[in-house]
Image (tube, rainbow, N blue to C red):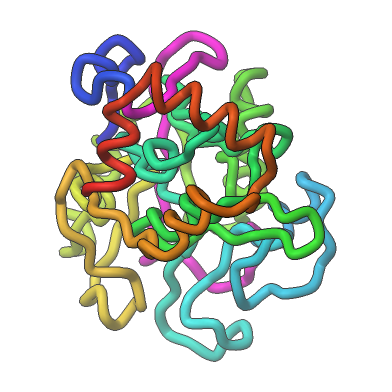
Amino acid sequence: MAINSTATLKQQYGNLVPTARLKDGRPRSILFDATRCIGCRHCVQACKDWNDHDRTSLYELSSTNWITMEPPVLEGMSPLWARNSCMHCTFAACAAVCPVEAITKYEEGPVVINKDVCIGCEYCIHACPWEVITKNEITGKASKCTMCSDRISEDKQPFCVQACPVDALDFGLSEEIAGKAKHQAEAVGGYVYGENEAGGGNVVYVLKESKEQYGVRDISGDKFPKHRIPLGLMLKDLFTPRCGIAGKMRALWLAITHPKRLIYRYFS
């Protein structure tokens, strides 16, 4: 479970991941208990409502749909359900590869994309081990769950958690959530998913059946996940006007001031 402060994160990862604080610096986490979920998708609709997204595209991730329930079938038609959304990784590979520092890992847990800074390079989309970042085809900006960072800054829980009618979602301080997840997993003869995958993060699941049955990804515990940014895409950014001159100038300056990110982006 991610319990690192900004100081600890910087000690672990140097300046690879831009970090900041929302409120008090105390890490928080979301717990999804698959053994309680009924697939009602109230969480999906609540996310849309809070973020002023349209109520279309319930069954696939998009710039206006940040949560899906897997498998993507109609309510009541599956015996097992799993959440698919940003896991808010402790080491946010998406933030490490972003050439303009448009993505920040907050001490309280959220990994957030600043759409005003994003230049639409798509590096984060290819770097995310969970494949949960999408691109808005109109604005060209990257998009994903924010863990309701605006609500957390006001000491409120994410809106999806508040909307769940069967308490399949919980939210609290990471140490407390870790204890709840372990206790519930033991009670149902299951296991905790998300505390080690990709180095861990601020979202964990309680699962009882195999990962394959839930449709969740089998991801290694590598704390520095290897990204999958196509070489051709990076070369295009170097030698063409793609992403704009202003974006390139900002990226160049940040590459000079944070060379480790440049090394991670091009050689990991």
Task: Write down the region rendered in magenta.
Answer: 16-43
Does the magenta-highlighted stretch encompass residue 240? no
- Please state, as top left, top right, bottom left or bottom right, where the N terminus lies in the image: top left
Q: Position of residue 108 (x, y in %)?
A: 45, 23
Residue 181 lies in what quarter of the image?
A: top left
Q: Is residue 89 visible?
A: yes
Q: Is residue 75 above or below residue 208?
A: below
User: Does 29 appear in magenta?
Assistant: yes
Q: Is residue 53 left or right of residue 168?
A: right
Residue 232 coordinates in the image, percent (x, y): 42, 65
User: Where is residue 120 shown, x and y percent of the image?
Assistant: 63, 50
Q: Is residue 41 above or below residue 163?
A: below
- Determine whether 73 is above or below 231 in the image: below
Residue 166 in picture, x, y percent from top left: 55, 58
Q: Answer yes or no: is residue 183 visible.
A: no
In the picture, measured across the screen, residue 262 lies left or right of residue 106, that is left
The foreground one among 40 and 259 is 259
Q: Residue at x 43, y 30 (%)?
A: 109
Q: How many marks?
A: 0
Residue that appears at 48% across and 66% down? 37
Q: Nearer the viewer, residue 52 or 264?
A: 264
Residue at 58%, 48% in the rendered image: 145
As drawn, the residue found furthest toward the bottom would be 77
Which secondary structure is most common in the magenta stretch? loop
